[in-house]
Structure formats: C-alpha cells, structure tokens
Image (spheres, rainbow, N blue to C red):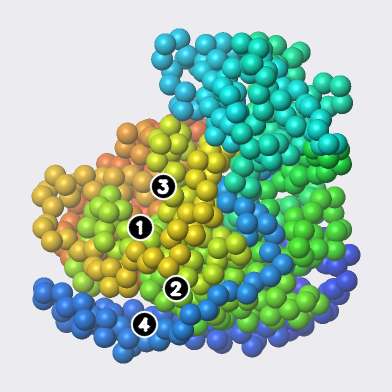
Amino acid sequence: MTAFVSIAGLEIDPVLYAFLVDEALPGTGVSADTFFSGLAKSLSELGPRNAALLARRDELQRLLDTWHKAHRGDTFDMKAYEAFLHEIGYIVPEGGPFSITTDNVDPEIASIAGPQLVVPLSNARYAVNAVNARWRSLYDALYGSDVIAETDGAEKTTGYNPVRGAKVVAYAASVLDIIAPLNTGSHADVYAYTLAESAGRKALIATLSDATVTGLRDPDAFVGYNGDRELSSILLRHHGLHARIIIDKNAPVGASHPAGVNDVLLEAAVTTIADAEDSVAAVDAADKTLIYRNWLGLMRGDLQAEFTKSGAEHTRVPAQDIAYTDPNGTAQTLPGRSLLLVRNVGLHMMTDAVRQNNKPVFEGIVDAFVTSLACLHDLKELGVARNTRTGSMYIVKPKQHGPDEVAFTVDLFSHVESVLGLPDKTIKIGVMDEERRTTINLKECIRAAQDRLIFINTGFLDRTGDEIHSIMEAGPVVRKADMKSAAWMLGYEDWNVDIGLGCGLSGRAQIGKGMWAKPDSMAEMVDTKIAHPQSGANCAWAPSPTAAVLHAIHYHQVDVFARQAELTGTPRATRETLLRLAVLSDLPDAAARTEELRSNIQSILGYVVRWVEHGIGCSKVPDLDDVGLMEDRATLRIASQLLANWLHHDLVSHEEVEDVLKEMAVIVDRQNENDPTYVPMTSDFAKNQAFQAARALIFEGRAQPNGYTEFVLHAFRRDWKAGALAS
C-alpha cells in the first residue's frame, strides 16, 4: 500500500509529492508549506460547497424526472414546462445587458480568429505536435489528404508524384489569391517574387510568366520577408492570420517552380487546449503526475518527445519564434507556437492522489492549484520559451451546470491566486457550454465570470449526452444522427453565438464551435466546416495539425469579426427552441432499431477497449464501415445514454443489447487484430474488463450522475491496472 506523505493536514501520493516539491515549486517563489497549506485550506472551505452543487444537480434531475413521468404521453405544453423550470430554479432570473470586462488577454484569444486544437496532455509527442501546429505546411496537408483527389494521375505513390505535386501547387496558389490577391493575374502565374523600395519602405512585386510586373491589391498584406540579396521567405497577413511563402530554388519542389516556391506555410492552430479531461485516461496519481509534468514542460517550453519512426530515432521539441524583417527594415518576430490553454476536470471528479481526513478530494480543486503552479514558470520566465505575453493563465472548465457553478470556479481561482501570490484575475476562465443548464442560463453564466471570461464553446457532443439524460423520463429520444437536426441543437448553435456577442465577447474572447470528427475526411471538412466562421465563431476545433492548416483557409475566406458585427443585435434563437424535447414522434421499425443498436454498441466497444486496457482517452475508432471517427468520453456519453434511454422505454430489450454486444465484439476484435497488445473480447466475455465496462455503461447508464461515463471507466481501468500489476 502506498505510503502517503503527510503535510498541512493532507496526505499526498509520494509520486505527486515528489513532482511538486522537486520540479513544480522550485523557482516559483512559492514554498511547499505555503502551497500545501493553501491547498488544504481551499479543500476545506470549497469542498463542502462543491459537494452541495453536485447535490443540487441530483435534486434538479429528480424534479425533472418526476415532472416528465407525470406528463409522459400528454400533449407537450411549453408554457407549463418553462414555468416549472423557473419554479424549481432550473432557469434562473436573467439580469440586464452587460459586457465582459476581461483584460490582459493575448491576441490569439481576443482578436485573431482561427482553428483550435485539443490535445491529450498524457501524450507528450501529440502535445508538442499541437504546439508546433501554429505553423504548418499547406503543401504537405494537401498532398497527404483527400482534398486533392487521386484521379487523372494524381494518386499517392511510394515516392513523390509530380502530377499530384502540381495540383497541390495550383491549389496553394488559389489560397494565396484569397490571402494576398495580385493587382493583375494569379499567384499561379508568378515567375519571380522581388522587392521594390519606395520612400524607405519595401513592397512586394510579382513578375508573371508573360512578363507583366504587378503588386498586391492590398499592399499592407505584405508584412515581412527573409533574405538579403535573394528572398527566402515572404510574410503575408490577412484577417489577422499570417502566411509564409518559402522560396528555395535548390529544393526539389522549389526547383520545379518558376519562382522557386518550395512551400506555403499557413498560420493554423493559433490556440490549443491542452486537455487533462475528456481526452485522457487519468485514474490515479501516476497518471495525473504525468499530465502535470507534461503541462509544466509546455509552460517551460522544454517538453521533449522521443520516438521511433521508420526505424530512426527522433526528438521533437517546441518550435522557435519566427524572425523576419518588416517592410520598414526593422527586425521582428512572430510566435512560433500555439497559445496554450489547459482544460481541468469538472466539479464531479474525485482523486485519491490527495486525501484529506483520509478521504479523496475534489480533483478539480487540485487541478486548479497544480496547473496554475506550472503556469508560474511561464509568467516568471523560468523556462526557454513563453506562452502568454500578457501575464495571464488560461484554464478551460468543463461540465459546469449553470451560473452558481461558474461562480464557484471563479472563487476557486481567487483562492489559487491568493496562495500563489498572483494579481487578482490573472487566471482566466473558458466556459464549456456543454450542459443543458449552462446553455439555458448562458448569459448569467457569462455574467458570473464577466471579468475573467475568455472563451465559450458549443461542446455539442457532451451537450447531446446531457440533453438525453435530462429528458430521460420524457420518452424515447430520437436516433443519434437525428439529434444533429433536432430543434434544440440548431437553436443551441445559434444561441451560443447570439448570447456571446450580446455580452461583448467580440474582440475580447473566443466564441468557439466543436470538433470535426472525421480526421481522414479532409475534403468533406474543407467543403463544410466553413459554416463555423460563417456562424460568427472565431475559433473551432480541428482533430489534427493537418486539419488545422486546412481549416485555416476558412478564416481567410470569412472575415469573422465583420461577420460578428453583422450578427450582433440580431438574435436567431430563443430559449423556447432550446427546451423542445427531442423525443420520437413515431417509433422506429425493427430494422432501424437494430441499426441504431449496432452502430452505437460498436462505437462504445471500440472506444472503451482502448480506454480500459490501453489508457487511451481519445482515439480514432473505426466505425462499422471502417471509417475512422474521433471518439472520446463525450461521444461515449451520447451512445451510452441513448441506449440507456431506449432500454428504459422498452424500445430494445436487455437480451437484444446483450446479443448485439457480442456480435459487435467480433467486429471490434477484427478491427484490432493487428495490434499485438490487444486482448480479444470474444475470448472470454465474462472476464474481459473492456466488454464488462461497455455493458455497465449501457445497463447502468440511467443511474450515472448526469449520464457521465467517467465513474464506470475509472473503476474498470483501475481494476485492469491492478490486475496487470499483479500479473
């Protein structure tokens, strides 16, 4: 049994304690006694309040269940329903107009619209990749994805295919025509890029293949260059985002280009959420310490990832800033790394990595203290690179239910600032709009954090899971695919932007949209994800660095802040729309029910087996058609809650679910057969931890608080780790 370290009335797991004392605290000016005493005091003072907020969630759900049971089968009465929600405090009184007052916000959040990555903090290599996705090769993204069709000789081959390469170069030139259009012709026709000087200021000149000499339609789009006698790079800016034309006539691609263009780099993931929540599987002190250590490395700028690829050893480190000369001849730099936010866990999570009175404590309180402590290394410039340039820390807080919980988080951050000796309001908050009670009361949630708020985001996956759980007793819900077009969902996406703009977020904070879930379907993403900036969102999640650079094109096609100005004051959604129940009006036939069972159960098994046995919190899981889809606990919450709902309302039987579980286990085993560490579920259903975890998520789903999957997953993962250790 672990011998905990006793300090300040706390018992700390020795692995976590050693990390804090030996790595996180030195240099910060915060002593171990100050840190642990402050943590203990906050746990004592805020712990009971945290518990009361969770009890309030349970009470409201009980009241919802009672109301829906009493009215099941009745013609839905919206006025009566809304009056009931007001009466029980589910909908809180709404105050007058206001605008957030958050200050000291980095421009990547306040005034630059662009893609946002979410990366699991448990994987150092992925984390460094995300940090370095601030700048990405458009050529590489196009060449390696399905945006360039493999037709007419443009197939991907084992070596470089010049036909495909030519299509990539042409596509990139069309993007440059959006970013920095020429007065005459296209970037596809440029034979040479040169500089001209007028009144002591450089201007970009393009000579076309027909000898036409032209310049940029907007001369201010040219903001810098590298190279003395010959240009090696050209820096452009459009809608606040940068692009770099890389010139190298000696490189393979550049040698074949008339102007020597070897690549086009786009400023892509301007921000990244380093995730310690839904995309990780952190169930004990060892897991949490790994996450905290990686976050510290990111804040110091010295996190390294060593890996083997194609038989060679590689080391990946965060990128350096980019040096260039501006048109006035002055040396300048641009950030080379994505600005980092960290996502802590929600209020409902507990950890035994720290104990008080021999009991586990609220994990979110520990997260706030430790992740903020790591940020001190950035603020005090203790590392080799900077994150914030304004002296702020950015914590994204998930799964908050209503303004009282947001207010609790604000108070928690004040506690942390006091202990760490930080100025008031140093810690900024990103509010995930992913729970029904937060959506409906979003304006008051923003008000509760109005001087710290830097982010709201429609986390539509978790939001769907909470919708299902909240209306569990109202009747059988619509199929998963139909949730995307349900009235509440359409209203939710508009409501989030409307409320955010009405509360003055434009130019001060991010209004975000959710994840593109098909990482291999980039052509489809390029065709459709432009809807996010068109909706007025100044950031949206992308599943990979490649997706980020392709999604960045959309922010050149849409002037998001101009779009926000158009939308401000023109509400498109109402609370009544948000309250419409997504229950079936006509029951699906047997074939449709079976199809829904198979689809959801296959995704549950495919995700859970990696979570429980491999500790992978976010992964690309092949669906029934072997199309890889990004899955995390949010997608799992939807699938498990939908099946729990259908079981509860007798659309499917216990026996049908059991049969499909075993049928889908065969498919998932086949999809993982090339993984030497994979343990087939079909070898012993009764003893396979992943299979049993999937069963529990479905059959016990209705009883899980708010439909969360964490409690089941953690229990089975800990059992699996204990068994692996014992063997």
Type of the residue with mark 3: Ala
Task: Name the quadrant containing residue 8.
Answer: bottom right
Disc 3: which residue: 531
Q: Amino acid at mark 1?
A: Ile
What's the distance in space between the residues labelled 4 and 2, CA to CA? 12 Å
For residue 651, side relative to residue 411 (left or right): left
The image's mark for residue 442 is: 2
Residue 337: percent from the left, percent from the top? 72, 46
Numbered tag placed on residue 90 in the rendering: 4
Tag 1 or tag 4, which sits nearer the N-term?
4
* Front of the two marks 1 and 2: 2
Q: Residue furthest front?
A: 199
Nearest the viewer among 147 and 374 is 147
Indicate whether 550 appears above or below 537: above
| Residue 658 tag number | none
Mark whose residue sits in front, 4 or 1: 4
Please, what secondary structure does the residue beneath circle 1 have?
helix
According to the picture, the residue beneath numbered tag 1 turns out to be 638
Please tell me whether mark 3 or mark 1 is closer to you in this view: 3
Q: Position of residue 167 (x, y in %)?
A: 51, 18
Residue 456 visible in image: yes
- Label 4 crowding class (10 Å Cα cut-off): few <14, some 14-19, many 20+? many
Quadrant of image for the N terminus:
bottom right
Residue type highlighted by circle 2: Leu
Disc 2 and disc 3: Cα gap in Å? 22 Å
Q: Residue at x 77, y 65 (%)?
A: 391
Which quadrant of the structure image shows residue 150? top left
Marks 3 and 1, the one that precedes in the sequence: 3
Q: Tell me the crowding category of disc 2: few under 14, some 14 to 19, or many 20 or more residues within 10 angstroms, Cα based.
A: many
